[in-house]
Amino acid sequence: MKKLILFLFIALFFTTSCENNDYSIEYIDDEVKQDFSISSLVIDRNRVAATSHVSFSVSIETALSVDATVTVASKNMCGGPISHLAETSTGTALIKAGDTTGTGSIFFADLNEEYYPIPYDGLSDCASFDVTGIALSEGDDPYVAAPLSVSTTLTAPNPDYMGDADDDAVMISMDWKNPSANDFDMYVTDTVDYSFFESAETGDRFEGDFFDNDSDVYYPAPDGVYLVWYAPYIQEAADVPAEIYFTHPVTGVVDVVSFVSANGTADWPPTPVATITKTTDAEGNMSYEIAAY
């Protein structure tokens, strides 16, 4: 009797498997494809740090009668011995029906492994933004006839000795061109009486600090607006470009503020270049908004 039951079970299994094989049918894209070109891809900055938030715009030559979603990928091939294994990320821009331009944003892809030191001038020929596809809200999606690619320069958001402090602190790192001839200092103050909350005067390639770290005596900093300043302790007789990277707690999002220290800038008083606006919600969660001064 047991053998008969086993036989019937096996027979039923094979009968069911043969009759229900929809899962094995390969997907066939039967949409009618037409060539389509993206006329321009504009990135809001020509220097990007890994994981930093970057805005972009895409344009088409002729407006469409339906909405179009354009996908842009960031490709990061910078790194060490395995640099050929690129890291990627994607973002989208919506071009509304009747328009020819849309805007979007993307978090630039991370390095495939740690790479230090990245010079201020950055790494070139190993990072890019690429238009990879377009989808229409109605009708058949077209091919992207001529994929558009924009090369970019990868920069370092912070020195290798800086790591995450805690779930609340904002990691701030300032970098500038030609550090062998220039030495900048950095400060964070409030906007009430300009009391110093942070100062960085190490004389190193980078100047950095953690704002609102739970080991700081002022922690937690009151909600409000704070100023980020720089002072050229030593500066060559030339304009010197610089950047400050703000890595947000928890999310790891990196905001970048760029500025130029003009030739002849006094070493004191310092010059404000960015603001940090702190907000704490009803549950005690702290957030920070970064903006150029």
Image (cartoon, rainbow, N blue to C red):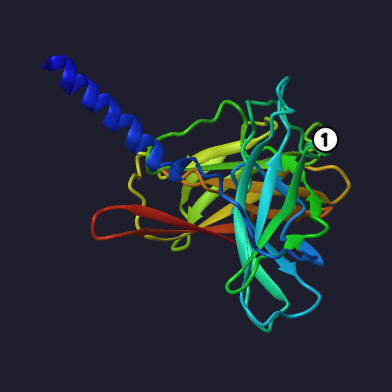
Q: Quadrant of residue 278?
A: bottom left
Examine the rendered structure and indicate whether residue 193 appears above or below residue 47. below
Is residue 274 toward the left or the right of residue 239 in the image?
left
Give x and y (percent) for residue 204.
67, 30
Count neighbours of disc 1 (C-alpha within 10 A) and say few if under 14, some if 14 to 19, many if 20 or more: few
SS for dot 1: loop
Q: Nearer the viewer, residue 39 or 120?
A: 39
- Which residue is the extreme one toward the left? 1
Instruction: Give residue 193's position: percent from left, percent from top.
Output: 45, 60
Mark 1 lies on residue: 181
Question: Residue drawn 57% across and 26% down?
Answer: 161
User: Percent x, y for residue 111?
Assistant: 64, 33
Quarter of the picture containing the N terminus is top left
Q: Tell which of 122 and 137 is nearer to you.
A: 137
Mark yes or no: residue 231 visible: no
Question: From this viewpoint, which residue is outermost toward the right?
Answer: 237
Q: Quadrant of residue 124?
A: top right
| Residue 129 appears in the picture as rendered | yes
- Vertical placement of residue 180 versus 49, above or below: above
Amino acid type, mark 1: Ala
| Quarter that holds the C terminus | bottom right
